[in-house]
Amino acid sequence: MAKKSQPTWGGRFSSSPAEKVLRFTESVSFDRRLALYDILGSVAHAKMLARIGALTRAECAAIVKGLERIGCEIVDGKFKWRADLEDVHMNIEADLTRRVPAGAKLHTARSRNDQVALDMRLFVRDQIHAVQDELRRLQRALVKLASVNSDVVIPGYTHLQRAQPVLIAHHLLAYVEMFDRDHGRLDDAFKRVNICPLGSGALAGSTLPLDREFVAKQLGFDGVTQNSMDAVSDRDFIVEFLADGALIALHVSRLAEDLILWASAEFGFIRIADAYTTGSSLMPQKKNPDALELLRGKTGRVYGNLVALLTLLKGLPMTYNRDLQEDKERLFDTADTLLATLGVLTDMLLNTKVVRERCEAAASDPALLATDLADYLVKKGVPFRQAHHIVGALVAEAERLGKPLNALPLETFKKHSPKFGPDVLQVFDVRRALAARTAAGAPSPANVKRQLKRWEKLLAD
């Protein structure tokens, strides 16, 4: 490591920080990830300083060229990071000043407080788009699996007990809806992220005639922050991203749980490609859905990052406090976890097959149509509560006799209600029962087909 130097803020100090304090407070080991965003912001800031006369055109050009060279070295892995310079900002500024004498002027009218606030917004902005892209890939994979198996029937479940028949495509499309809400929430969050804080200084702006709108336009922001104190201390946009990420992780976890169940021997509804499963060190027959279990498990760390940041922020006075250094690792970890989990889940779905015969066997359970049997009576004028009681008694009698509900003789049906006629057995036709579910949002084949076409078009666009 290079020889420790006096910090840039060290004018009023008689000594440098103690070695332990330096190691404890440095952030360059992780915030170097913001380097290219820092350079992007610095280039815009330099151009603005030239615009207001704080830099000459030649000085600005030299600074921009120097920053671009540093950026190339960072990308190539050749840049020498120094822990004694604390953070990404001072590392870049110190190296720039060594190369370009005018680099010492770059920090004019700027604080690391508004600088890091800018870098974080630029980072979150890109992460929103990256996560949205992965969400769309995942939705396409779900729609593809649903389309290939659009006529396969499975039991729908409540309380993890068989409830009513649905098309497996309808079940998969439920997750497409969930992930679409996630995509929309990120759209909404982007509006609050895409505001430029640079020019707020440490907390009270600058006496120089800054052109903040010019910087915002250079960096593609929609506008500038309106309160300098709020601008440097605001981390709501990170909290919002982490909260949106927590919901995405929740939905990933729920889908993973369904897929884990479906892949089990007890269900056997799907087969996952070997490349997305693992074996046992002891039991040679095992094929474990470890990737799905990790997808489910990583939800906890995403939740933890959100709670950690909320806890970090809850007692902070205005404006900037060093506590805020702790926001970055929480943000980076959530972004990385989301992108990794969404990518693995998408690839796995593209390599998963539905086992039609197992699905159809499970869906052939006549008890799934008990509610349809009650509806049969309702259509014949029986109040629903009474019809529910009658069918419940029939189910109990079938269980006592050890027979499927549709194997009871007509006389047994009539014993419970004279409204039952010879057509009662038609109720137990699963395809007919599904076709009758025509209300908006219901799982009739016609509805599901329309939804598949709708999503295919939306996701293609």
Image: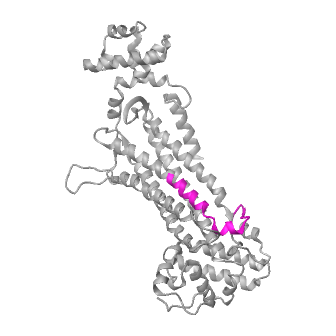
Query: Relative to residue 202, is residue 157 drawn left or right?
Result: left
Name the residue located 48 percent from the left edge and 17 percent from the top edge: 384
**Location of residue 25 in the rendering, given as x and y in whole percent from the top left corner:** 51, 79
Our reading of the magenta stretch's main secondary structure is helix
Residue 457, picture quadrant: top right
**Location of residue 215 in the rendering, given as x and y in whole percent from the top left corner:** 72, 70
Viewer-proximal residue among 368 and 350: 368
Query: Colour scheme of this structure image?
Result: one colour
Magenta highlight on residue 85 = no
Name the residue located 67 percent from the left edge and 80 percent from the top edge: 64
Residue 8, picture quadrant: bottom right
Residue 377 can be seen, yes or no:
yes
Viewer-proximal residue among 331 and 184: 331
Viewer-proximal residue among 387 and 140: 387
Q: Is residue 280 above or below residue 361?
A: below
**Location of residue 449 in the rendering, given as x and y in whole percent from the top left corner:** 51, 33
Magenta highlight on residue 230 = yes
Residue 219 can be seen, yes or no:
no
Query: Relative to residue 4, is residue 400 drawn left or right?
Result: left
State the extent of the magenta-drawn residues as a range: 218-246
**Location of residue 68 in the rendering, given as x and y in whole percent from the top left corner:** 62, 79
Total tally of numbered discs in the picture: 0
Name the residue located 71 percent from the left edge and 64 percent from the top edge: 225
Name the residue located 48 percent from the left edge and 77 percent from the top edge: 29
Q: Is residue 203 above or below residue 141?
A: below
Viewer-proximal residue among 96 and 392: 392
